[in-house]
Amino acid sequence: MMKKTLDQKIERILADSSVGDFILADAKDGDMGGGIPSPGRNRGDDTDRHPYGTHQNYLQYMRDVTEQGLVDIMLMSVSSSEQLTINERLFDNSAVTPAIRANDTTDIWLGDSGIYSSQPSLPFRSTTIEHAQCGKWNCAPEERRLGADLGLYSMTFNNDTHLDRQALQAYKDFRIEAEQKEFRHFLEVFVPNAPGDNAPKDVAGYVNDAIAKTLAGITSAGRPLFLKIPYFGPAALEALVRYDSNVIVGILGGPSGTTHDSYRMLWEAKKYGARAALFGRKINNSEDQLSSVIVLRAIADGELDAESAVREYHGMLEKKGIKPDRPLKDDLVLTQV
């Protein structure tokens, strides 16, 4: 198999945190929690009747972005990975690493219906490590390399003793199993989703403290490769990055916003110490996903600043004859500051 850029970059970043390497992931695991809207906006001629794309559209975008070769990770649901990683062998001759969402806590059960996200997060795993590795529950030793060997594990702390103990126990169980089965993971930590009367006054500080406490109890054999957290701004990010240089900190994309919102977040996060970014909706809802990834890669590699990147992206859309969702002047506005 081709050498994966993820492995090369992690090795270099851990050896010297000042290197310019940056891990970029396309997060197309939305079907694990997002329901029918997960493939993103339908840009066909029948949008009035069908506002969202199909799962087949979603899979094709995964193929297209992977074959483009500019992201380091393609994050998928385990069912998508079965199709692309195991059945189609999409990643065999690719520098892109396939990864799956290893758990689906209740706070990611979103879509256009339900109220799960307003209730305190509870740990849950739809899939198993075996199904990620070989597509069935009883992998033979030689079959464990057929599928993905990397998963995203997510946690949400709500500043509640009983709930957070339950979440930590579930993560401990997962880590032990993953270590036994040689399955790697990276860790996502969300903001408290329904803390009620226990809402912390300083959410960013609380999340940083929860991460530091969690990692302190994990030896190198079971540690996540890197973190995926909300971007709370320069001060909170710098505090976490400075705390332990052996921890690679990455950000999650969050809501789509304007194109400048997306690009500014990436540019600023890298400036203050992030070395990874996982953008789902920000790629999936763009007018042209391949052009969007080209520009995100350029920002991550220090070749473009945020405002120049917006102009570059609109120039790409114009060349392709694609009408932007917003005029350039509106897309240059920052709404998420």
Image (tube, rainbow, N blue to C red):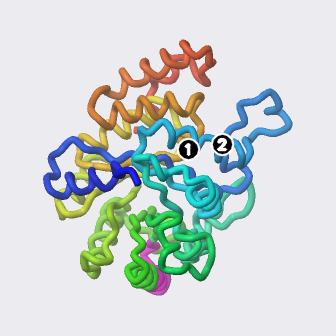
Could you tell me residue 121's position as x and y percent? 55, 72
Of residues 333 and 53, the one nearer the viewer is 53
Q: At which x and y percent is residue 62?
A: 57, 45
Residue at 58% x, 66% y is: 107
Residue 34, magenta (yes or no): no
Above or below 239: residue 127 = below
The residue drawn where x is 57% and y is 29% is: 288
Is the C-beta separation of discs 2 and 1 under 8 Å?
A: yes
Q: Which mark is residue 47?
A: none
Q: Position of residue 334 (x, y in %)?
A: 43, 30
Give the extent of the magenta segment.
Answer: 157-170
Q: Residue at x 38, y 35 (%)?
A: 297
* Residue 168 painted magenta: yes
Residue beneath disc 2: 40
Relative to residue 113, is residue 251 drawn left or right?
left
Q: Could you tell which of marks 2 and 1 lies nearer the N-terminus?
A: 2
Give the amino acid at mark 1: Arg
Residue linked to disc 1: 281
Within 10 Å of the Cα at label 2, are there few (<14), some (14-19), or many (20+) other Cα atoms?
many
Question: Which quadrant of the figure contains the N terminus?
Answer: bottom left
Q: Could you tell me how many numbered marks the image carries?
A: 2
Which residue is pictured at 63% across the width and 58% down the height? 87
Tell me the CA gap for discs 2 and 1.
8 Å
Quadrant where the C terminus is found in the figure: top left
Q: Amino acid at mark 2?
A: Gly
50 left or right, relative to 77 = right
